[in-house]
């Protein structure tokens, strides 16, 4: 399956879903996915959610956060499900996109408090002038510090994109 033959993220996810459903339908397995296509020349993004948490979008100009949401079933459950593109046509230098797993914001400390989206947004806002790599490291280090000496209970997967 060549990615170039699919003209949109939704078309690609429809094809991926067909293959995964065929391979996994008897096992009961499935997977979530957040697919993001960035057009740096057109200064736009297009995405598709397949049961994954929405991505977090930080608009640097006004220091606000929004979710890159949309609908979409997890991959591998329904071969006939049709995924839909969502898009944003105004992205600017300094904007930040974070795609992550719930192991970030659901990390707990010794008083059973969750790290949460508020802490996550605070780290991003305080690190916004840094590189994507530094923002990622600051998030991971903040989660580790927040957990204190407690073991990590869930996976932490994180992609940070900073528009330049």
Image (cartoon, rainbow, N blue to C red):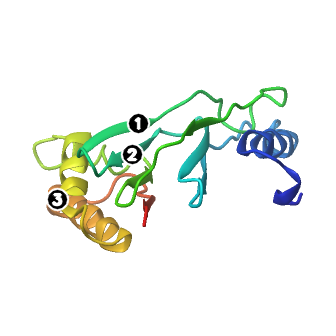
Q: Is residue 33 visible?
A: no
Question: Do callouts 2 and 3 mark residues in contact (Cβ within 8 Å)?
Answer: no
Residue tagged 2? 57
Dot 1 falls on a residue whose secondary structure is strand
Measured as percent of width and height from the top left, residue 5 is found at 89, 54
Dot 3 falls on a residue whose secondary structure is helix
- Up the image or down, 81 lies above or below 26; here it is above
- Which circle marks residue 17 in the picture? none
Q: Which of the two discs, 2 and 3, labels the residue nearer the N terminus?
A: 2
Q: Which of the two discs, 1 and 3, labels the residue nearer the N terminus?
A: 1
Quadrant containing the N terminus in the rendered view: bottom right
Q: Label 1 vs label 2: CA separation?
A: 6 Å
Residue tagged 1? 67
Looking at the image, which is closer to me, 65 or 147? 65
Q: Residue at x 88, y 41 (%)?
A: 22
Quadrant containing the C terminus in the rendered view: bottom left
Q: Residue at x 40, y 57 (%)?
A: 156
Residues packed near mark 2 inside 10 Å, few (<14), some (14 to 19) or many (20 plus): some
Residue tagged 3? 126
Looking at the image, which is closer to me, 154 or 58? 58
Q: Is residue 94 visible?
A: yes
| Relative to 20, 130 lies left or right | left
Residues packed near mark 3 inside 10 Å, few (<14), some (14 to 19) or many (20 plus): few
Q: Label 2 vs label 3: CA separation?
A: 15 Å
Find the residue positioned furthest to the front. 42
Measured as percent of width and height from the top left, residue 98 is found at 41, 53
Question: Do callouts 1 and 2 mark residues in contact (Cβ within 8 Å)?
Answer: yes
Residues packed near mark 1 inside 10 Å, few (<14), some (14 to 19) or many (20 plus): few
């Amino acid at each position: 399956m060549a990615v170039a033959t699919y003209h949109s993220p939704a078309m690609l996810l429809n094809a991926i879903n067909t293959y995964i459903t065929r391979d996994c339908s008897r096992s009961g397995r499935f997977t979530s996915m957040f697919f993001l296509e960035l057009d740096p020349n057109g200064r736009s993004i297009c995405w598709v959610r397949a049961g994954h948490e929405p991505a977090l979008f930080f608009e640097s100009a006004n220091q606000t956060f929004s979710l890159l949401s949309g609908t979409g079933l997890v991959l591998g459950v329904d071969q006939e499900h049709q995924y839909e593109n969502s898009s944003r046509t105004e992205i600017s230098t300094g904007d930040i996109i974070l795609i992550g797993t719930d192991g970030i914001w659901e990390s707990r400390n010794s008083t059973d408090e969750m790290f949460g989206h508020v802490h996550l947004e605070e780290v991003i806002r305080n690190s916004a002038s840094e590189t994507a790599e530094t923002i990622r490291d600051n998030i991971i280090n903040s989660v580790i510090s927040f957990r204190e000496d407690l073991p990590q209970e869930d996976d932490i997967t994180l992609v940070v994109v900073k528009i330049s």
